[in-house]
């Protein structure tokens, strides 16, 4: 482990040793995107293109008695309107290979047929000459329902005799697993010096990408293909599901992803609307565009995060954790998402809850329950913001019970010896858990925040300091995903690299950039591997006809897995370049090396042949090639992370002040010490951290998707769904540690989700630290001004802190 301070961004070392990795080079995609020359789905316009909107359910639960589209079809500008019966599509079904006692598969129809399960569920697609006519057509539709009682909370879903959202899911439970139960754990609790418990809740959230979902579909006669231009994190999975729902061979469906404005997981599952748009384009015989408006994005898109934990932990008198017991309930809404299923959140939480701590005994039950709300999908962090928050609350509470410093109790429990196999049967690769915690505390103390807190208390102000330690499993390979028993197992990635006669390189990746700067970071890896200028590398993603296969971008897998695949492909191309170069230099391959666009003799640097000459031989004068060498300069490679993947880690520290009278939580200082292994592009890493922390603060203090008692969304606009702006997000100072990963080609670990994971717990702990004199502790997010105000109203007994 080495330390890189916040300002030590390395300069490119290409001129000296051919290295681009580790340098914050100018990003390749920036000129296009910041000058408005990017192309997003909504920028696409095709001749004869029809515009789609969806007739959506206005009730949360009930039978569909009748759908009358007569007036819709008469609406000026409307071209057609189709129901499920018109399009005859297959369902989207996510399956876990578990017994029915553990998992109940449910079908999600592309368009609802005889029953609706949440307000906003699509019932019919309306096609018109323009979006406004399509909206008019939607308003003209008449749907008759036989409404039934909606299930809108986990308590209601699990209550005896509750209405069933799916008839085949008893007790509204889609998943119920007990993955770990250490023998004798009750004896441990019985004999422990200290037992603390927490009942915690987190609100439902919307991932809220800047670009809403959208698709343009056209039939390409020459290729006999349905061309699907859509903003998705998983283009190959969209192709597979669309082909299956339409009953077509996969070769007749091509998915192309233009520039994409964020996803955060909401776009790493397959949506219904893009499938319906594809079917409608075929039926109508015209291109079809659908762009999700913000109202639909807030009320009918995939959501996440609504979880409830009942957890307790046992400690010895020295503050060392002895046992952890948790009951986790995740409200997954109306349907399982494809391919991850409704198990995505409870399985993640159950498998990884011990986190960075040495937990000797562990018992957990994880449940996914279904309600009449919009379905859930993975969202940046996937359960880790929640279970980390619960773990951190347990340690904070134990520290209070045992009169220990909150940092010291963490210090006594974090894992320090690696590799470490936990009670959850997960093996952690080396990290810097203790070092990150120590450095973070050192920075807080050095800046004088503890003195500030004492002085503020003496003045009657309410200031708190909170910490959070966590790790982030990144680069899940096939082995790790297989443990979830998904019918389809994500994991590997493929890359193809080819050099042209000018010595430039095109490299493909099955990952999918939606704001992570893949065009730059993957190019840096290739340029370093081949010893060429990064400007000579072009990265291609998001085209199922050009990319052999890929699992897209989610779970911080792009650099760890995708980057390793492109590195291996580049390495193979390098071997071929050396082989041909050595032949042209009339020497052996072991005598030559790659250097700044040439193959040169290791001992006589004057003897060198440029890549252009090698490419000339490979393509234009194959008679110059070695006898055993095929023409061309194209290589492929795949990569799959072995074992349990790799783990990045971080410690966050937050200083907050609570304002009497308003209940506002003001963040005075935010510090992050993170370790994602080798940082390919430090500026991109910091961008990922800051963006994630902003989303984490949003969950901690602001965002909550709410419904009324009938299941009607009550936050379908930004008036009601409170999203923080730049004014509410503080400056974030980031410090880096580097523990190179032994499993990836570059030594990098993923970093995409950490900020989101750490922020809620750190903010909540800081608020509770501020409230410490009152004896009040909050255990749920968001921490709204109303909840804080209620706590502050008890501050009459506030005494200066010591």
Image (cartoon, grey):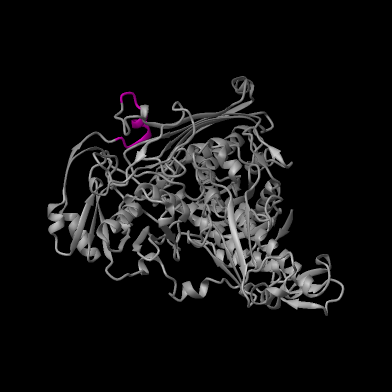
Front in this rendered view, residue 331 or 20: 20
Indicate left or right for 680 with 204 as reference. right
Percent across and percent down for residue 675 are 66, 54
Can residue 266 be seen in this snapshot?
no
* Residue 406 on image: x %, y %: 62, 41
Residue 116, given in percent of the width and then of the height, sits at 26, 40
Q: Going 46% across and 49% down the picture, which residue do you hit?
A: 379
Q: Nearer the viewer, residue 431 or 234?
A: 234
Tell me the magenta residue range.
151-161
Asked if the stretch drawn in magenta spans residue 156, the answer is yes
Tally of numbered tags: 0
Q: Which quarter of the image is occupied by the C terminus?
A: top right
Quadrant in the picture for residue 394: top right
Depth order, front residue of 66/49: 49
Above or below for 386 versus 639: above
The residue most toward the right is 603
Please tell me which residue is depicted at 12% across the width and 58% down the height of the picture: 74
Query: Measured from the top left, where is residue 317 in percent x and y?
Result: 67, 29
* Residue 390 in view of the camera: yes
Q: Is residue 610 above or below residue 294?
A: below
- Asked if the stretch drawn in magenta spans residue 319, the answer is no
């Amino acid at each position: 482990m080495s330390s890189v301070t916040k300002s030590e961004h390395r300069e490119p070392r290409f001129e000296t040793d051919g290295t681009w990795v580790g340098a914050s080079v100018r990003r390749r995609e920036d000129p296009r995107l910041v000058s408005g020359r990017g192309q997003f789905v909504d920028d696409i316009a095709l001749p004869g293109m029809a515009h789609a909107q969806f007739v959506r359910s206005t009730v949360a639960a009930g039978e569909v008695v009748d759908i009358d589209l007569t007036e819709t079809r008469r609406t000026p500008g409307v071209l057609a309107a189709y129901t499920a019966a018109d399009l005859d599509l297959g369902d989207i079904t996510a399956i876990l290979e578990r017994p029915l006692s553990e998992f109940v598969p449910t079908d999600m129809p592309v368009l609802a047929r005889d029953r609706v399960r949440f307000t906003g569920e699509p019932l019919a697609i309306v096609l018109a000459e323009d979006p406004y006519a399509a909206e008019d057509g939607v308003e003209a539709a008449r749907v008759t329902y036989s409404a039934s009682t909606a299930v809108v909370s986990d308590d209601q879903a699990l209550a005896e005799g509750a209405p069933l959202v799916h008839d085949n899911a008893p007790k509204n439970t889609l998943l119920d697993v007990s993955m770990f139960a250490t023998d004798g754990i009750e004896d441990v609790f019985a004999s422990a010096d200290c037992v603390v418990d927490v009942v915690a809740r987190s609100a439902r959230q919307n991932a809220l990408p800047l670009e809403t979902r959208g698709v343009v579909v056209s039939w390409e006669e020459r290729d006999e293909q349905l061309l699907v231009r859509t903003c998705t994190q998983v283009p190959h999975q969209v192709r597979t599901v669309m082909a299956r729902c339409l009953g077509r061979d996969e070769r007749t469906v091509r998915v192309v992803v233009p520039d994409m404005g964020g996803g955060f997981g909401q776009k790493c599952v397959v949506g219904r609307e893009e499938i319906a748009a594809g079917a409608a384009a075929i039926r109508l015989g015209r291109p079809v565009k659908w762009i999700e408006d913000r109202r639909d994005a807030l009320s009918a898109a995939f959501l996440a995060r609504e979880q409830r934990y009942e957890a307790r932990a046992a400690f010895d008198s020295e503050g060392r954790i002895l046992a952890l017991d948790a009951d986790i309930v995740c409200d997954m809404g109306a349907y399982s998402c494809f391919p991850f299923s409704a198990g995505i959140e409870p399985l993640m939480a159950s498998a990884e809850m011990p986190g960075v701590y040495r937990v000797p005994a562990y018992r957990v039950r994880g449940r996914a329950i279904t309600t009449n709300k919009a379905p859930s999908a993975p969202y940046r962090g996937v359960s880790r913001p929640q279970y980390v928050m619960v773990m951190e609350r347990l340690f904070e509470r134990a520290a209070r019970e045992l009169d220990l410093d909150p940092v010291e109790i963490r210090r006594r429990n974090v894992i320090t010896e690696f590799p470490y196999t936990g009670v959850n049967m997960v093996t952690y690769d080396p990290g810097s858990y203790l070092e990150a915690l120590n450095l973070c505390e050192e920075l807080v103390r050095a800046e004088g925040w503890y003195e500030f807190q004492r002085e503020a208390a003496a003045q009657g102000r309410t200031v708190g300091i909170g910490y959070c330690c966590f790790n982030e499993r990144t680069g899940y390979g096939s082995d790790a995903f297989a443990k979830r028993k998904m019918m389809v197992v994500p994991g590997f990635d493929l890359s193809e690299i080819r050099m042209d006669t000018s010595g430039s390189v095109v490299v493909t990746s099955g990952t999918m950039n939606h704001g992570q700067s893949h065009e730059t970071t993957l190019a840096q890896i290739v340029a370093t591997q081949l010893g060429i200028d990064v400007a000579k590398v072009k990265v291609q993603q998001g085209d199922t006809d050009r990319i052999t296969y890929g699992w897209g971008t989610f779970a911080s897998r792009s650099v760890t897995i995708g980057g390793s695949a492109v590195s291996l492909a580049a390495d193979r191309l390098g071997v071929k370049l050396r082989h041909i170069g050595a032949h042209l230099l009339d020497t052996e391959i072991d005598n030559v090396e790659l250097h700044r666009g040439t193959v040169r003799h290791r001992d006589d640097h004057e003897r060198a042949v440029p890549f252009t000459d090698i490419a000339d031989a490979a393509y234009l004068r194959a008679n110059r090639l070695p006898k055993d060498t095929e023409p061309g300069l194209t290589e492929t490679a795949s990569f799959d992370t072995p074992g349990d993947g790799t783990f990045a880690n971080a410690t966050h520290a937050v200083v907050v002040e609570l304002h009497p009278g308003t209940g506002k939580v003001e963040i005075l200082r935010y510090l992050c010490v993170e370790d994602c292994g080798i940082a390919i592009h430090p500026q991109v890493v910091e961008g990922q951290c800051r963006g994630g922390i902003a989303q984490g603060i949003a969950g901690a203090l602001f965002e909550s998707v709410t419904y009324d008692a009938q299941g009607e969304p009550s936050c379908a606009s930004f008036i009601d769904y409170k999203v923080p702006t730049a004014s509410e997000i503080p400056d974030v100072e980031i410090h880096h540690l580097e523990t190179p990963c032994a499993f990836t080609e570059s030594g990098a670990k993923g970093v995409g989700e950490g900020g989101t994971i750490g922020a809620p717990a750190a903010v909540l702990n800081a608020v509770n630290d501020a409230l410490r004199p009152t004896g009040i502790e909050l255990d749920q997010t968001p921490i709204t001004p109303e909840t804080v105000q209620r706590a502050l109203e008890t501050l009459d007994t506030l005494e200066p802190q010591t």
